[in-house]
Amino acid sequence: MREPISRHAFELVALSIAAAIAAHAPHLPIWLCIGAPAALIARVVLRRRGAGPAPLVIRLPAACLLLVVVVLHYGTLFGREPGSALGCGLLALKLLETEHARDARVAVGFAGFVLMSALLFTQSLVFTIGVSLTLIVLFAALVALQPAPAAPGHRLRAELRVGAILLACGLPLAAAGFVLVPRLSTPLWGGNDRASEGHTGLTDSMEPGALTDLLIDDSPAFRVRFDASPPPPQQRYFRAIVLSDFDGAAWTRGRRGDFLRSEEAERDGAPVDYAITLEPTDRRWLPTLDLPFVAPGGAHFSAARELIAEDVVSQPREYRVRSSSRYTFAARISEQERARALALPDGFDPKTRALAAQWRAANAEDFGVVRAALALFHASFTYTLHPPLLGRDSIDDFLFSTRQGFCEHYASAFVVLMRSAGIPARVVTGYQGGWWNDSGGYLLVRNSDAHAWAEVWIAGRGWVRVDPTAAVSPARIELGAAAANDASSWAQSEWVRAFRNHFDRVNGWWTQTVIRFDALRQRGLLAPFGVDTANQGDLLIALSIVLAIVLLLATVWAMRESKPPRDDALDAAWAALGRHLERAGIASKPSEGPLDLLARARAALPTSAATLNGLVGDYVALRYGVDEPVPERVRFFTNAVRQFRVPRRVKKRKAAETVQR
Amino acid sequence: MAATIAELRIRALALAERRLPALTRLRKPEALPIRLDRRRIYVLPTGFGIAFSLLLFVMLLGALNYANNPALLLTCLFGAAGGASLFAGFRAMNGLSLVRVASDECHAGTPLALHLRFAPSTHARPSLRLRAGDEETAFALPAGVEGGTTAMLPTTVRGWMRAGRVRVSTDYPLGLFRIWSWLNPDAEFLVFPAIENPAPPLPGGDTRGEIASRDGAGEDHAGLRDYRITDAPRLIAWKASARHDALLVRDAERRSDDALVLDYAAQHGLDHEARIRRLTAWVLAADAAQRDYIVRIPGGTFGPGAGAVQRHACLRALALLPHA
């Protein structure tokens, strides 16, 4: 116990630690990504050369340094990211002092904790499976700490095997625990300190280039299941945020809209009912198909009919909405609203205003101006995700010199043109398109499907959706973002995309069944057992029952060899003969050998003396005459014993005769 | 302080063994084979096991607090696999069957090598530990063959010695649970007396009865007897055997005036134990020199004779002399 652990065990422990830190790599600061592995490698190499654990003179300053650097980097020690950085650093430092089994076990246990905390950042199926499989390495490291392995030749293989078996044996119980451990309805501490961290997603401001990060992010944004058939691709506009305020550079949502009267809408076409499962965004906007009419619980419509949740979406969230693609939205608007939808910052983009004034003069109808703008885009603009940079008068630059851009450039320029021409207009961001998963029966919308378009207010028609990007790149609207964006890199190649799309069905299942499993669903869990709404006590009872059953099965398994090995056939036959004799009143005594028993039996049963002589003689010859009795002879003996009949005792026979007389 | 704790511990143990018949039973020596089954296998979490459960609890709280289901799943997996390790460890102990106990020759003051042999089992049993006295040795039993281990027991006095209770334990595979049982085989071992060191030269240190002359004397037909399985092949009288229908060996027995006399009574000025130590040293020296010798001690005379049988008889007699 007090001896240093073997090199093999030590390096498995180091590997476990490295794996735990690697799980955090995507969000660790770069200095830790380099420093921690360097410390691990240095320790492993030095130990191979015979060096002992790092002295306190090194460890203590290193730990202090880690603390200071984490505080400097994050500004605090508390919270998810600083906590995980500190944990990874401390874990690496732990290996520096690890020399004995005790330290190694602590290190492996801590590695398990760090591994689990990695799941606070990414909950995807692949990552969860990867992290779970890493547990095998941790278990193998613990097994390697054991003395006297069974097979010294193939240690690593045997240890990994034990780890895998343990994990597999743990699966049923883990599943039961997962399903039945009562979930908390409110967090015990901290709440959600995750807002505005990590996730990419739409924000309430938009400036040229802001969406680029989002448009290259292939992760799912949400999945939509339609009650009936899905709408055609060109109608798959999911509204999220309405941006009305422009300062010359950026569009913002502003808060003024929150105090306005809600805009009224009337449904003109058939309703579309659907459910959306939204991946966490850490924001409150819930995308809805243009245009939503019935808000789900826990959310409300803003004045511009954005659907806003009461809490930030930090967990996957499912909501049902009723929309319609044909509608009349705000047939009348107030002066206030009108003024807001016409406002432009002074002193920006003079050429754009001049052009708009020119169109206004040429077209009496508002639709004419709209058509003119779309015609302009269609004639001489190109769609690209890598547009040139724009100057101070960004709209002028875009319209008259660069003429390259993507949805947000077109939406922005279009709305500025409309406002300059006196038509109320605003920018809407959201998602457009998506990929229809035929086998799964749902629409997958990725972050890269993020889109920006415009709404113009036409007297008598209300707000009308206009997508200027469609004029430039119809493929973007009809075939989706992936088709419109440059498809040159290998990651964008056809088969990779196809695979990813199909694999998304599994991801969708994962999100639906595992990530979104919550207190609400738990309540209905015991319905098959007659408990309609299971409270936490019921769940704990169910958990205890399952636990007891699993423990019972495991105990049966563990004890299945506790029966002493079966006697061999010869002993069994001899025991059978003993039972025959016992029924005849000749019980064998512990002190008695076969020959002594034979002597007594012959005396008591003179009629069977010859048979008994033969049987006992055979047994003695088989048992004591040879090392290993011949199986055929043992069988013969067994048969002979089976055929042996103890004659009824003399006294009884006499008694029977007496009765007959 | 430490003494108080030790005393309390002993009293607690005594109380436990009085109250719990199973424990008392384990104090009594048992006949071989001793088979470990669920009634005598004990399980408790190790310190690491307790720390592990606390860690699991913290992980569980964290996962529940952040409503993070994958983290909860991982925590459940971690814990369930840890729980499963209990059964793997139990299986490594369950059905373990001690079939033979033997010891090497041992003189008081040197450790007694206690060999334990276990019956073959259907599965391998790795990472078992045997604790005898304060010494712990680790061993593994491969599947299908008889295996064993050796424990070193300290010895202090000559005479019969019990193996005493030895503990077989394991915390295989993860070190979370200690699974143990007691073995108290009903076996006694003879501890030979300590050897005087340095010992004076053998008495009557003249060169009578040299090996060469003894070999010559061995040709005498009168000194033949039947072959016994312990006889060395070189002692077989081949020519004489050919004339009979059985193997004959030259009898090593000599006339007593040829043999060394190692006499307890002649060791003046030494106390009881010192005499025994000296005779022991001389027996070994005479045996190493392949000489005939007689040992005279209170209660008996052994020899004349030489060889393993004589040596063992003499050492045994010396070991079993009553303690003064």
Image: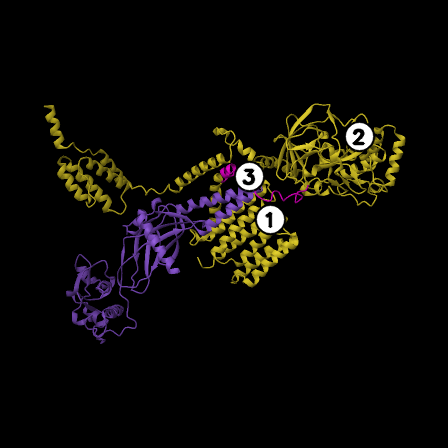
- Is residue A151 in view from this perspective? yes
Amino acid type assigned to the residue bearing label 2 in the image: Ser
Q: Which residue is mark 1?
A: A24
Local SS, label 3: loop
On screen, residue A110 above or below A311? below
**Residue A179's mark?**
none
**x, y (%) of residue A207?**
77, 42
* Chain coloured purple: B
Q: Quadrant of residue B278?
A: bottom left
Tell me whether circle 2 and circle 1 mark residues in contact (CB < 8 Å). Answer: no
Q: Position of residue A201 (x, y in %)?
A: 69, 40
- Is residue A304 within the magenta segment? no
Name the mark nearer the viewer: 2 or 1. 2
Comparing A485 with A213, the one in front is A213
**Would you place residue A548 above or below residue A51 in this image?**
above
Q: Which residues are magenta?
A: A174-200
Mark 2 = which residue? A334
Residue that appears at 22% across and 42% down: A619
B269 to A71, vertically: above or below = below
Q: Chain of mark 2?
A: A
Q: Are marks 3 and 2 on the same chain?
A: yes
Q: Label 1, label 3: how many angstroms apart (C-alpha)?
A: 26 Å
